[in-house]
Amino acid sequence: MADNIHVKLPDGSDKEFPRGTTALEIAKGISPRLADAALAAKTNGDLIDLTRPLEKDTALRILTDRDPEALEVYRHSSAHLLAAAVLELFPETKLGHGPPTESGFFYDFYRPTPFTPEDLEKIEKKMQELVKQDIPYAREFVPRDQGLAEFKKEGDFMKCHFVEQFTKPDEKISIYRTGKFADFCRGPHIPSTGKIKAFKLLNVAGAYWLGDEKNPQLQRIYGTSFFSKKELEDRKRPRSATTACWASSWIYFPFRNWPARG
């Protein structure tokens, strides 16, 4: 096996790096400013963490807030920030999943007590505190049995379902940790919470777990995030087609098929 790999950059240049070099290390070699602005990377069309080792020849793009693809990763990390804040404030809460959406992100929670508008304000404040702490989104791979044992210990029945549904008994599973919060998640994520500059929690909606009314009732917290406060403020201005998105609501909708994504 060759010790080096070839990396093709957007300017057309083809450079050689030691196998296992990360996109972040390459960004630092190009420009410290680029490395500081970097949020994620794209290799041969796939979005990846900046810290994932590159093991084979690839085309590489470093993504910043100028790249639309980076917003998907940014909002996924915003969903994890929301979950981390909820667990800090309401540790009895059980976790569902939290993907990005076209307009923002959401996370599903099981908690017998309904979240109130006052709770959302507290959660948003806690999210801001976690942003200031600049906590890394750290990825690790653990044996499936170890991951299941961890989630079972916390009573996270939905996480156990996802692990059992989307992984095989003999494989390792991907876990992202953000402070005290651990999630079964394929990623990718931005480097740390400090990269999230502007976000807003919008409303709470409801659904039955796996779309079955005999199952626990979940609470889905919706939010949105942008690369800058200006973009967020522009989005908050009343518009006939979008004003409803910012109104509080309690909506019930079924969902059955879950992605293997945090």
Image (cartoon, grey):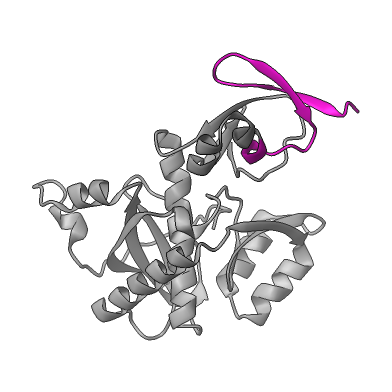
Residue drawn at point x = 35 percent, y = 67 percent: 221
State yes or no: residue 4 in magenta.
yes
Indicate left or right for 175 with 211 as reference.
right
* Residue placed furthest toward the right: 1
Find residue 202 and report its image quarter: bottom left
Residue drawn at point x = 65 percent, y = 45 percent: 51
Q: Which residues are magenta?
A: 1-25
- Position above or below: 108 against 57: below
* Residue placed furthest toward the top: 12
Residue drawn at point x = 59 percent, y = 29 percent: 30
Check the picture and name the quadrant holding the N terminus: top right
Check the picture and name the quadrant holding the C terminus: bottom right
Asked if residue 45 can be seen in this view, the reply is no
Indicate left or right for 25 with 144 as reference.
left
Locate residue 136, reporting x and y percent.
58, 59
Locate residue 95, reporting x and y percent.
51, 71
- Position above or below: 145 against 74: below
Locate residue 99, reporting x and y percent.
46, 54
Find residue 47 and report its image quarter: top right
